[in-house]
């Protein structure tokens, strides 16, 4: 039913926004990996609501519990189940949506597919579904750290609406990203973003933007030809996140304006290994990582649920006006940064374990 991701390192997320809780089941984690709730909680804290005055004020501690797959602080090789209870539910805020569809939300499409929908919070269409992804991403990150100690994943907000920051993916650090509640690593732009988000929220509206991500220190050789290309799996991972509308890697759409002689990444030897003089490929060629930084961008649309009156129709086909209540982000990007990092870790971990299972000579 669309809730499973990955092949060797595979996850299944479950739960609804206004149910008893949300979580994830992880299969394929190697045994004897040190793992406790303390390894997972920091990632969930970065994703949770209520962490600053520019995100939704819903009060959730998002405290995780490992229910299975770990004994005495070590993974057993069996499925790992992680639970995060829901604590601050206000389902009454969704009473008007019982019969009215929110514009650009999943209300109508879920009902068209299943003949029923979870009205409160949007059910599986809620961003609370991503808790399971972020928890699993923390586990994937631990595996990657064991396999590739120099690998690091850093995502950051590069644009909110027309406010754009020049960020060097080769040098940006996690500390710089976390220095602002916007998770934009350029202080002057970050301050302008805070003011913009607050102004838009005061008008009952929402805005979108772009998140950049870089993977540094990774190996060459991850990814499979044809249908399981590394960049194709990254694209699927990112576009499966709520509110995403675009993905580009390397030069992306801008590369269409160049000639091949301008766009090609010339090979050279650097520190005893094959490298490229430029990185317009974004670290992936032929669907396989080439050892250069993997650089990509993800576009997020404005939050669909807003406090301004909008025209819609009811489930009975009558014209109506809807003004959402509830507690919603005016801009999802600050909280989406750890989601992008988690999905990146899941893809890389899956491909790394698939590479090891394939037993390629020299790997």
Image: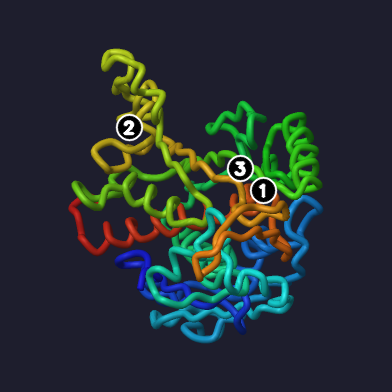
Q: Which residue is mark 2?
A: 273
Q: How is the image coloured?
A: rainbow
Between 111 and 73, the one nearer to me in the picture = 111
Cβ–Cβ under 8 Å for marks 1 and 3: yes
> Which residue corresponds to the image point at 37% horizontal and 21% vertical from the top-left?
277
Element carrying mark 1: loop
Between the residue at mark 1 and the residue at mark 3, the CA separation in whole angstroms equals 6 Å
From this viewpoint, is residue 130 visible? Answer: no
Q: Residues within 10 Å of mark 3 (few under 14, many from 20)?
A: many
Question: Mark 3 against mark 2, which lies toward the viewer?
Answer: 3
Between the residue at mark 3 and the residue at mark 2, the CA separation in whole angstroms equals 40 Å
The image's mark for residue 208 is: 3
Q: Residues within 10 Å of mark 2 (few under 14, many from 20)?
A: few
Quarter of the image where the N terminus is located: bottom left
The image's mark for residue 331 is: 1
Q: Position of residue 203 (x, y in %)?
A: 78, 45
Between 218 and 100, the one nearer to me in the picture = 100
Between 175 and 320, the one nearer to me in the picture = 320
Between the residue at mark 2 and the residue at mark 1, the CA separation in whole angstroms equals 42 Å
């Amino acid at each position: 039913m669309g809730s499973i991701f990955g092949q060797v390192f595979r996850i299944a997320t479950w739960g609804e926004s206004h149910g008893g809780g949300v979580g994830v089941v992880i299969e394929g984690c190697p045994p004897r990996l040190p793992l406790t709730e303390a390894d997972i909680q920091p990632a969930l804290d970065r994703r949770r609501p209520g962490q600053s005055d520019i995100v939704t004020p819903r009060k959730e501690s998002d405290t995780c519990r490992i229910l299975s797959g770990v004994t005495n602080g070590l993974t057993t090789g069996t499925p790992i189940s992680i639970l995060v209870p829901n604590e601050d539910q206000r389902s009454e805020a969704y009473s008007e949506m019982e019969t009215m569809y929110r514009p650009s939300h999943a209300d109508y499409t879920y009902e068209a597919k299943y003949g029923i929908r979870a009205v409160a919070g949007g059910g599986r269409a809620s961003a609370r579904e991503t808790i399971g992804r972020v928890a699993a991403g923390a586990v994937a990150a631990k595996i990657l750290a064991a396999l590739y100690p120099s690998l690091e994943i850093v995502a950051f907000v590069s644009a909110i609406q027309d406010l754009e920051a020049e960020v060097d993916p080769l040098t940006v650090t996690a500390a710089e990203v976390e220095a602002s509640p916007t998770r934009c690593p350029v202080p002057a732009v970050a301050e302008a973003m805070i003011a913009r988000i607050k102004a838009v929220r005061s008008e009952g509206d929402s805005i979108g933007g772009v998140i950049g991500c870089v993977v540094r220190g990774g190996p060459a050789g991850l990814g499979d030809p044809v249908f399981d290309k590394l960049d194709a799996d990254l694209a699927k991972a990112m576009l499966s996140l709520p509110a995403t509308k675009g993905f580009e890697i390397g030069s992306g759409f801008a590369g269409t304006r160049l000639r091949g002689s301008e766009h090609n990444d010339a090979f050279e030897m650097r520190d005893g290994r094959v490298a490229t003089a430029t990185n317009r490929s974004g670290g992936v060629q032929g669907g396989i990582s080439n050892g250069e930084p993997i650089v990509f961008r993800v576009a997020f649309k404005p939050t669909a649920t807003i406090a301004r009156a909008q025209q819609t129709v009811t489930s009975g086909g009558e014209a109506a006006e809807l003004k959402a209540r509830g507690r919603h982000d005016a801009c999802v990007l600050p909280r989406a940064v750890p989601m992008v990092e988690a999905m990146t870790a899941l893809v890389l971990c899956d491909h790394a374990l698939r590479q090891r299972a394939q037993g390629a000579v020299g790997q």
